[in-house]
Image: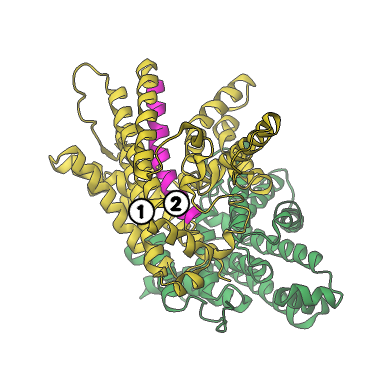
Amino acid sequence: MGLFVNITLDGITNGMVFAALALALVLIFRATKILNFAQGAMAMMTTFIGFTLLNRGLGYWWALVAVLAIAFVLGALVERVLIRPLQGKSELNPVIVTIGLLVVLEGLAGAIYGNSSRGFPPAYSQSGLTIGHTKIAFSHFDIFILVAVLVLMVGTLALFRATTLGLRMRASAFSGEISRLLGVRVGRLLTLGWALAGVAGALAGFLVAPTSSFSPYFMDLILVYAFTAAVIGGLESPVGALIGGLITGLSISYVGGYLGSGLQPLGALVLLMVTLMARPEGIFARPTARRV
Amino acid sequence: MSGAGNLADADLLPGTPPDAAGADRSWLRHLRLPEQPLARHLILALGGGGILYLVTSSLSPYNDFLVGEIALYLIALAGLSLLTGVNGQISLGHGAFMAVGAYTIALLMTHTQLNFILELLASVGAAAVLGVVIGVPATRLKGPYLAGMTLLLALALPPIADKWSSTFGGDQGLTTTVPTAPGNINPEEWLTWIELLGALITLVLLANFLRSRFGRMLRAVRDDEIAASLAGIHVARTKVTAFVISAACAGLAGAFLGLSTGVVSTGEFPLPLSIQLLAAMVIGGTGSLMGMWWGAVLLVYLPQWSTSISSHLNLGSDVSAYLATIIFGAVLIVAMIAAPSGIQGGLRLAWGRAVRLWSGLTRKQIQPTRTG
């Protein structure tokens, strides 16, 4: 029983991280129909920059703020420089460009920081809390992860639901041409979407680095888990990303806890394939008609 | 308009004539080869094989080894080119199919005394079976979804071999042995010839296949799934077949990789392998078979060149280990933005210009080429 509770708690924490990265994928996909395969590598890069800042003696919170700001700029830059020139071309072209970016960023991180895993400091203690007399696999740092991702989610929802800017972003994702006719600067909003996705991804990287083997490839698996989460959630909705993240996190955790961690990616693959076979549009997407 | 359908008017394949296998014929036209595809492809393969035989006989064993590597990557790239370029499906997981091929031949060599050819065919078959498993759900997926699923496949498969390490040898891996060479041919050369023969057979089969009715069906499905199904093509079956053929090619390539390294372990099939295959395919010229020669040469020689560059410039060990990766990714991005049809597309364009220039100079009526 204790094992089950601990695995579940672990799954929830992981699920929140997957949800943050899934949110990044969703933010870009709903606006541009592009799946950003470099999202994990971008988060890896910003986390390494944060690692350097921490080593230079910057405080944790200032480093986090700096990393999120850098991620914002990086996301915007990627959209402007790499993705914009491909507008209106086949959907495979941007996919391949983001894969190229993934390769370059992992190569750069490897060239600068080397291939070895390092320890990344957490914000709070990582030792489990004690409830009554039993120690559970849930630490202060896990609470911080939960709160941070929830704040990110609520912030994103508030942006989309309650502000004019969010309304414009939704409008330009819904129909770029009509929004442009109504005076919305669609191009700028696309850049903003990529920048916000960069922030969400960077937060995920910063939060997960202490609990993973922090090396240039540490976000690869987390990216595919986040992709699974985003697909389960329908790739279009932030709430779907959160729920998809939790479903993926829990499934991965149970597979790891009862069958061994080596089978976790396979578990995610099965989960993804089952979802795609049963509901290709995800659980939360409305059915769409395809025009001939 | 279906998602994959955009590929035809897209820039991944600009100027690709309807028959991608025949796309490289522009310069071959002047050789006055027979029109019958099988005869033409066989003559080309025999000619190419003869040249390669002469070249490899004069090379050092190490360079022979590199030529063999080119041949095996060529096999995997040709299958990938068929899948992505001709059928419009993207795969980021071809390293996994290679792993299946490699482990199959290694397991057979460890536990059985089968004939070498049968072992190779079993590797191809095992990869093809995985191709069915992945290809069937893939028929319902559009580009980015399929890319994500195959990416997950590339990450999910290698840990299985670690999990059941008593069967798959774990980190140590399984050993393979190259069949003994007849006479006094040295072993590197012998393996290289086997690999080259495999590559030429694969190319002839694929080129013929692309010129057949089925090849046209693949393209029809790529260009517009709905129109293709209205024309009586079974879209799902066509897509699964493309996936299976592509996976089978990767399986053969994997078996050869297992033979050439002598050891099959999980470390040889990391995610970067799958990604590099896709990158090399794009840089070589998506959808073309001849273009895959460029991609395979790049896969094998880029690490060599970057090592010599970094030792020349006295770069640190970390930099030199990752220089090839960085160059590869950067070339992929630049190619995608500036020249999406890859090296082969660029050469085709240049050849078309040269032909037009020449015909202008000689004022002779020349058949209009589609390459221009």
The residue labelled by disc 2 is: B82
Chain A colour is: green
Residue B64 location, x and y as percent? 38, 23
> Quick one: label 1, few (<14), some, or many (20+) residues within 10 Å?
many
Q: Determine whether label 2 and label 1 are within 8 Å by CB.
A: yes
B288 in relation to A264, above or below: above
Quadrant for the N terminus of chain A, please. bottom left
A236 in relation to B184, above or below: below
Residue beneath the point at 82% across and 79% down: A164
B296 in relation to A47, above or below: above
Nearest the viewer among A2 and B144 is: B144
First in sequence: mark 2 vs mark 1: 2
Span shown in magenta: B62-86
Residue beneath the point at 58% across and 55% down: A209
Q: Is residue A256 visible?
A: no
Magenta segment main secondary structure: helix
Amino acid type, residue under disc 2 in the picture: Leu
Residue A250 location, x and y as percent? 45, 72
Judged from the image, the secondary structure of the residue bearing numbered disc 2 is helix
Q: Residue furthest right?
A: A183
Nearest the viewer among B182 and A219 is: B182
The residue labelled by disc 1 is: B245
